[in-house]
Image (cartoon, rainbow, N blue to C red):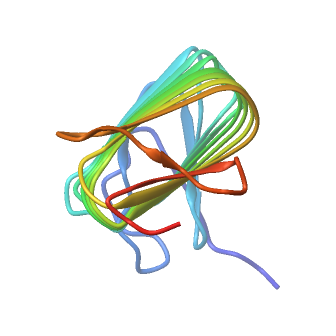
């Protein structure tokens, strides 16, 4: 099967019928599945219309601002900083620091990272696996699962610490275990 490929320096057009994030820095390649920015040394992107599917691979720094309903991943970069509206799926893998702020209904994964720091909206879920530090602030009902995390700090905005569930790995804010 042949996949359509778009190579962009400043991505603004749609490829495969999906909104494409605008990136500055790095080398950007888009397929029908996602746009990848190879950070050299940094990728700074935005998706003002929302609905983008993107990734930052390799390099030093990655930053993405998305209106909502985006899927974004950072892999093998030093730092990843993402801001997203509602219903986003975000993943950080194999990096030093991952920091995100997300609206309601977000799904976030942090794996093999030194420091994960998330602020999430209501009805969000966070997974931290094999991390040194997982710090999450929930702005409404949320669920956080920490597996092999040195520290797992979950704060329920306006209510203090989260409830630790009987499995010892799951923490919840304003929700049952």
Q: Is residue 139 left or right of residue 28?
A: left
Identity of the residue furthest to the bottom in this view: 1
**Residue nearest the observer in this picture, 119 or 99:** 119
**Residue 113 at x, y = what percent?**
70, 26
Q: How many marks?
A: 0
**Residue 4 at x, y = what percent?**
63, 73
Q: Is residue 112 left or right of residue 16?
A: right
Identity of the residue furthest to the front in this view: 166
Q: Is residue 113 above or below residue 104?
A: above
Q: Is residue 109 left or right of residue 8?
A: right
**Residue nearest the observer in this picture, 163 or 25:** 163
- Residue at image location 23% in from the left, 40% down from the top: 157
- Residue at image location 70% in from the left, 47% down from the top: 168
- Residue at image location 28% in from the left, 61% down from the top: 122
- Residue at image location 45% in from the left, 24% down from the top: 25
**Residue 40 at x, y = what percent?**
59, 18
Does the rendering let one see residue 107? no
**Residue nearest the observer in this picture, 122 or 109:** 122
Q: Is residue 96 left or right of residue 104?
A: right
Which picture quadrant has residue 63? top left
**Residue nearest the observer in this picture, 131 or 153:** 153
Which picture quadrant has residue 12? bottom left
Q: Where does the N terminus fall, quadrant-wise? A: bottom right
Does the rendering let one see residue 167? yes
């Amino acid at each position: 099967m042949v996949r359509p490929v778009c190579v962009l320096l400043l991505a603004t057009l749609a490829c495969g019928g999906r909104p494409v994030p605008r990136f500055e820095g790095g080398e950007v390649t888009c397929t029908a599945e996602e746009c990848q920015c190879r950070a050299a040394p940094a990728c700074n992107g935005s998706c003002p219309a929302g609905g983008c599917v993107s990734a930052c691979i390799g390099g030093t720094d990655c930053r993405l601002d998305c209106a909502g309903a985006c899927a974004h991943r950072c892999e093998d970069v030093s730092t990843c900083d993402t801001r997203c509206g509602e219903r986003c799926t975000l993943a950080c893998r194999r990096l030093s620091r991952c920091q995100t702020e997300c609206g309601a209904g977000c799904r976030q994964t942090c794996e093999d990272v030194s420091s994960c720091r998330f602020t999430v909206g209501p009805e969000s879920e966070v997974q931290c696996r094999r991390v040194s530090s997982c710090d999450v602030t929930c702005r409404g009902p949320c669920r956080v699962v920490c597996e092999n995390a040195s520290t797992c700090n979950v704060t329920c905005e306006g209510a203090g610490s989260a409830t630790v569930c009987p499995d010892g790995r799951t923490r919840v804010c304003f929700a049952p275990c």
